[in-house]
Image: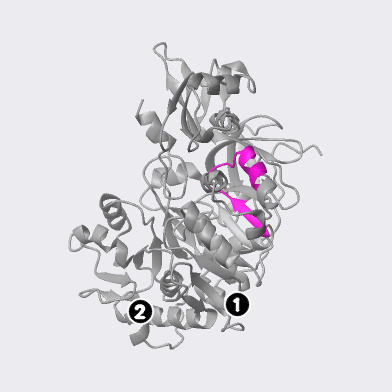
Amino acid sequence: MQLSRADHSVSPPLVDIPRDYNAAHDLLARNAKRPEKTAFINALTGERLTYGELAEQSQRFANALRAHGFWPESRVMLAMLDTPEWPVAFLGCILAGVVPVAVNTLLTTQDFEFMLNDSRAHGLIVSHALLPVFEPLLGKIDTLKTVIVSGAGDYSPYTTVSHMVRESSATINIANTCSDEACFWLYSSGSTGSPKGTVHLHSHLIQTAELYGRAVLGIEESDVVYSAAKLFFAYGLGNGLTFPMSVGATAVLLPARPASADVFALLKKFQPTIFYGVPTLYASLLADPARLARSEFKPRVCTSAGEALPAEIGRQWTAHYGCEILDGIGSTEMLHIFLSNRAGQVRYGTTGQAVPGYALRLIGDDGRECDTGEIGELQVNGPSAALMYWNNREKTKTTFTGEWTRCGDKYTRDADGFYTYGGRTDDMLKVGGIYVSPFEVEACLMTHPAVLEVAVIGVAQADHLVKAKAFAVLKPGRTATAEELQAHVKERLAPYKYPRWIEFVSELPKTATGKIQRFKLRQRQ
């Protein structure tokens, strides 16, 4: 089927959201009929929180926030590990009309200082294990009035989430919010530089649940889900909270970082039917000699986002576990995935087709829409686009252009409407006047049996001409030379695309969500 220049076909939103609307109340009310059903499980401790307990504790926490002087539209930073107290705090804030600002838990004191000052948060909810990172800032940030600690124990002089829940009333009191009102913030991951406070509306959570969770994944009440991406990440928030809550499924939470051994133990014990991963994790799991056998883990569906999935990783995973990986792309700005492969229609090496409810277009360097096969910048139009970047008017204007959101990714589209990733706009290379996709070179290097991970950047020579350089991480116990890897690429791609230099490294710089920070590699040159 020959498509027109842009895939402008947009299905209407699958949920009619009224003007008077509170996102947390909607998610909780959907599960009032299943109060005994397990909503969240802590994979480390075995703690379980039922939907009935979640609703009561969230309401109690909302009432406690009011008692502590928090008013509608005031902001509270959430720096919390993935435990059942995370959804209690997040939903409780929203029930009270307070705006939770979820942040990456692996950042530095300096990073958190920037975010506290930038957001002017009046409160901080922090896991006890992270408290030492924040202590140098307490008393230093004028707008920060209240610190609330998450975790069992006494953390005097600070109050705790559990104490606030115990001591507060369970009286139903839902803030009078509307669907177009600011609901929560997420800070962008920083894969291209400084993080930006991204403001989302009450309507956005359920839109992504209906358009991707239900329409693409087919999530149901009987599903058990596990997301390697944490709840503070847009991808993880949908995976581990919004999607399962929208249908009454059960989510398994892992407070620790998703090391291969811990992930394998979780998959074997809880047998999630939906496994949400990222490319680097899939590669690590496949390369681990202790990986689970096919008989030990039988998911219904797996997904990948954060970075484009190398085709070889997808094929190896399917061959080993008999389950396709639905590779897709989303963003903090769009809250979740808007372009994805579908079950039974997976084409590894592509990012699939537009998710129902979203329109896509590719724009060339000359500003016109691209024809089939031409490379251009991906732009998306859909109902979950963020309102703005906080305190960053110029970046807001260049990213959110009318009804379209610029993604910063280069893509091509084939005649069937499948999109193939070319790289970040800032990462694209022009070699001899011809665009070279760093991801294409990376995907080729990933097919070498010794390569675990790789990142490709452009390096300017003395004559100012740009050539490709690769940073390669080898699999444990494997060896390879630069010449061997260069020959591997030359045999499979056009000669001008091979990396002129290859540097072997022990690891690649990444965000906490698994995205490779290529700008840091460029800074080292």
**Placement of 525 over or under 53, stated as above or below:** above
- Which residue lies under the disc numbered 2? 162
- Of residues 138 and 371, the one nearer the viewer is 138
Say which amino acid is labelled 2: Ser
Percent position of residue 157, x then y: 20, 74
- Which residue lies under the disc numbered 1? 30
Quadrant containing the N terminus in the rendered view: top right
Say which amino acid is labelled 1: Arg
Spot the residue most to the top. Answer: 463
Report the magenta residues as a range.
Answer: 298-317
Q: Is 316 in the magenta?
A: yes
Crowd band around label 1 with a 10 angstrom C-alpha radius: few (<14), some (14–19), many (20+): some
Residue lying at 44% horizontally and 84% vertically, measured from the top left: 173
Asked if one can make out residue 33 in the rendered structure from this viewpoint, the answer is yes
Percent position of residue 501, x then y: 46, 20
**Residue 276 placement: quadrant:** bottom right
- Of residues 284 and 296, the one nearer the viewer is 296
**Placement of 488 over or under 370, stated as above or below:** above
